[in-house]
Amino acid sequence: MRDRSVILGIETSCDETAAALLVDGEIVADRTTRQVLHEYYGGVVPELASRAHERLLAPAVQSILNEAGLKPSDVTGVAVTYGPGLAGALLVGLSFAKGYSGAMGIPFWAINHIEAHLWIAQLTHGTLPLPSLALIVSGGHTLLIAVEGLGKYKFLGSTKDDAVGELFDKVGRVIGFPFPAGAQIDKLAIEYIGKPVLFPVSRVKGDPYAFSFSGIKTAVLGHITKVGARADSGTVRLDDEERKAICAGLMNSVYKSIAAPLSHALSEKRYEALIVAGGVSASKFLRQQLAKLTDEADVRLIIPPFHHCTDNGAMIAYLGHLLEINGVKSSSYAQDVNPSARLHQERVQ
């Protein structure tokens, strides 16, 4: 099998333990295990996430090797997330990858988690048109980036406070939704056909590319406290219609707050497409609204399939594949995790 490219991708940046295999650029096995233990705490507990990765990662890798009918020695390269993310969680994946690389005598590539989110759409949508505008929306990130090519990015703007996914989880915790709350909020917003609650649309004065969601969070939580009944658990009891109206209003405000920087960037008429990635890009509500925005701007909308929006091993393996075919050498064993890694930071060679 060594005459073929077999890339193992490992992702352990937060609470998903993920591994995938690509053979000559095609996915042959893909496994993601979400650590449900964090639901009890209403958010990710870093130490518990690290311990769960230690327990789950090796079986996950063995499982995908079995599924693909491959042996550990058939793998020709390992790609692994080094950041951004939780330091302890990242260390589990990076240590495993270095050990696998050393034992098998194969290269490994330290992968930027955000960069991997950008490029996974190419696996299903074909070669990405360039230059493109990229919106990364997830539990920890809300970023606007100009993409000129592989490794060629220009940072345009980010959130000044909460990320979109973080906003959803904070609101969901008060309403009583299980963690993570984004999917449930999105579902109710899509289902609702009445009049949504009106919440403010955030703007950042003096920075047309920036995002802000703390004002929306304050307004939504204030409204929930006003109309609901406080339960012993710390959540607020709401009737079904009120809950749906709140979720619809929240999604409307989030979209409008996202749309303003996007519209400003797209007005430059230099981008061929809008790439949307990250866990929140799985939102059906946002997909519908962004489709309208890109139609009006006459640019292509590119969003990965739902199962590749959240953190996954396939996106890490695929970026490893791109680095391999572009002649990027193996990362150094001196490569460390970087919880606050940005796209402009170079890999250690």
Image: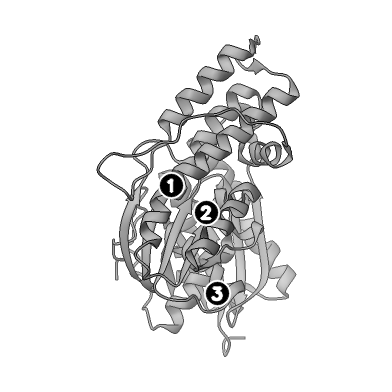
Judged from the image, the secondary structure of the residue bearing numbered disc 2 is loop
Residue in view at x 64 percent, y 14 percent: 228
Q: Earlier in the sequence, mark 2 or mark 1?
A: 1
Q: Is residue 227 above or below residue 271?
A: above
- Where, quadrant-wise, is the N terminus in this rendering? bottom right
Counting from the top left corner in percent of width and height, residue 307 is at: 65, 58
Q: Earlier in the sequence, mark 1 or mark 3?
A: 3
Residue identifier under label 2: 278
Number of numbered labels in the structure image = 3
Kindly tell me whether residue 275 is visible in this rendering.
yes
Which quadrant of the structure image shows residue 239?
A: top right
Q: Which numbered marker is on residue 64? A: none
Which quadrant of the structure image shows residue 332?
A: bottom left
Residue identifier under label 3: 7
243, 48: nearer the viewer? 243
86, 254: nearer the viewer? 254
Q: Amino acid at mark 1?
A: His
Residue identifier under label 1: 141
Q: Is residue 23 above or below residue 151?
A: below
Kindly tell me whether residue 44 is visible in this rendering.
no
CA separation in Å, label 1 and label 3: 27 Å
Q: Nearer the viewer, mark 3 or mark 2?
A: 2
Q: Nearer the viewer, mark 1 or mark 3?
A: 1
Residue density around tag 2, few if under 14, some if 14–19, many if 20 or more, within 10 Å: many
